Amino acid sequence: MSSSSLKPLSIFPPVLVLFILIPFFLLSFHFHVFALHATSFDAFQNEVEQGAKETYALLRWKATLDDHSQSILSSWNGSRHCNWSGIFCNEAGSVVNISVTDSGLNGTLQSLSFLSFPNLIKLNLRNNSLYGVIPSHISNLTKLTILDLSFNNISRKIPSEISSLASLGFFSLFANHINGTIPREIGLLTSLSVLSLQDNYLTGSIPASIIGNLSDLTELYLHDNILSGSIPPDVGRMRSLGTLDLSRNKLTGAVPASMGNLSNLEYLYFYDNELSGSIPKELGMLGNLYVLQLSSNNMVGKIPASIANLSNLFNLLLDANNFVGGIPVSVGNLTKLVTLSASTTKFLVQSRLQLEA
């Protein structure tokens, strides 16, 4: 048999091939269009269902509040929850911000189903009359970046489940009735830049996990509580800190020398505690410091000459301690200093004589 006999007897003409393939192309096209429409429909259906869940959760919570609160939330009716007062949604119609402040809302958070708000970024209920506890199911708000419950009547302990809010950058419970200790789990909130727990009834020591782990913290307010124990030495690792207020507690021990590492610190309040020891000379390294208040403690020793290095200082309170010697003459070179208080009987007379020398 010749080799030519192995070749196909005929070859489909190009036109015929195209004619055969066109139905396949059309079928594939229609399939992809159908799949696209199906996906879009599913997404739309999910958005509608999510919106319905959020609406129900908000109305259910509203129903648990007192009559005054319900009148404040009079716009909360119907199904268009994105148009309600204090409710803000994303383009998909899902709630990302609940902000109802200064409104006298009276009730608890227990009936607010946090699980119904998977996209919530901000929860601001500042300055209302909310009471009861912070529910443990707040842990479901995993996208939350701002949590402001300040100026309410919330009581009992901070739940350890707060550690689930990994994206939290701002956390305030200022001026409530929170008691118990500061949960060490707050140290897991490494995105925090502001932690405001002042004016409560917190007891126990300052957890080392907070001081050691929250390296991005710029503002830490723990004043006006009943905290005891010493200031953790790891405070020197909080290099982003601009404000540190631990005043009006029952803290003891010495001011850590490691605080000299806080090069961004501008406001330092340690007054009205039971701190002892001397002022570490390392505080003179805080060149950005505007305010230094150490009054009403049990501190001793001489005021270090390095204080005169704080060229931006305008407020220096050292009164009601047990310092010896006088105020270093070089303090007179602090041209921005407006307020200086170091009055303790004989010390005051001595310091004035040295400053006038």
Image (cartoon, rainbow, N blue to C red):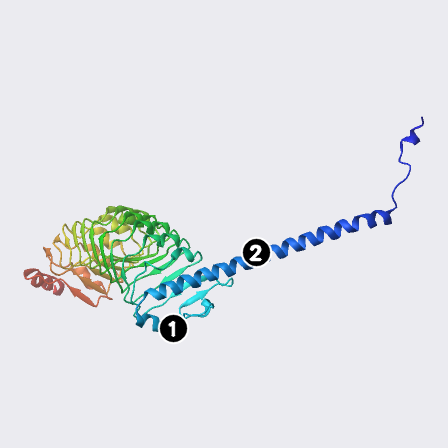
Kind of residue indicated by mark 2: Asp
Q: CA distance from mark 2 to mark 1?
A: 33 Å
Q: Position of residue 316 (x, y in %)?
A: 19, 62
Q: Quadrant of the C terminus?
A: bottom left
The part of the image, by quadrant, that contains residue 242 is bottom left
Quadrant of the image occupied by residue 44: bottom right
Q: Is residue 106 above or below residue 39?
A: below
Label annotation for residue 343:
none
Q: Is residue 98 left or right of residue 296?
A: right
Estimate how packed mark 1 is, as few (under 14), some (14 to 19) or many (20 or more) residues with alpha carbons within 10 Å. few
Q: Secondary structure at mark 1?
A: loop
Q: Amino acid at mark 1?
A: Ser
Seen from the viewer's position, the closer of residues 80 and 153 is: 80
Q: Which residue is mark 2?
A: 42
Outermost residue, top direction?
Answer: 1
- Residue 168 lies left or right of residue 27; in this view the side is left
Could you tell me residue 179's position as x and y percent? 22, 55
**Mark linked to residue 74:** 1
Q: Is residue 214 visible?
A: no
Residue 26 on image: x %, y %: 75, 53
- At x 46%, y 64%, the residue is 89
Query: Front-most of 168 and 139?
Result: 139
Of the image marks 2 and 1, the number of the one nearer the N terminus: 2
Query: Dot 2, how many residues are within 10 Å of its Cα: few (below 14), some (14-19), or many (20+)?
Result: few
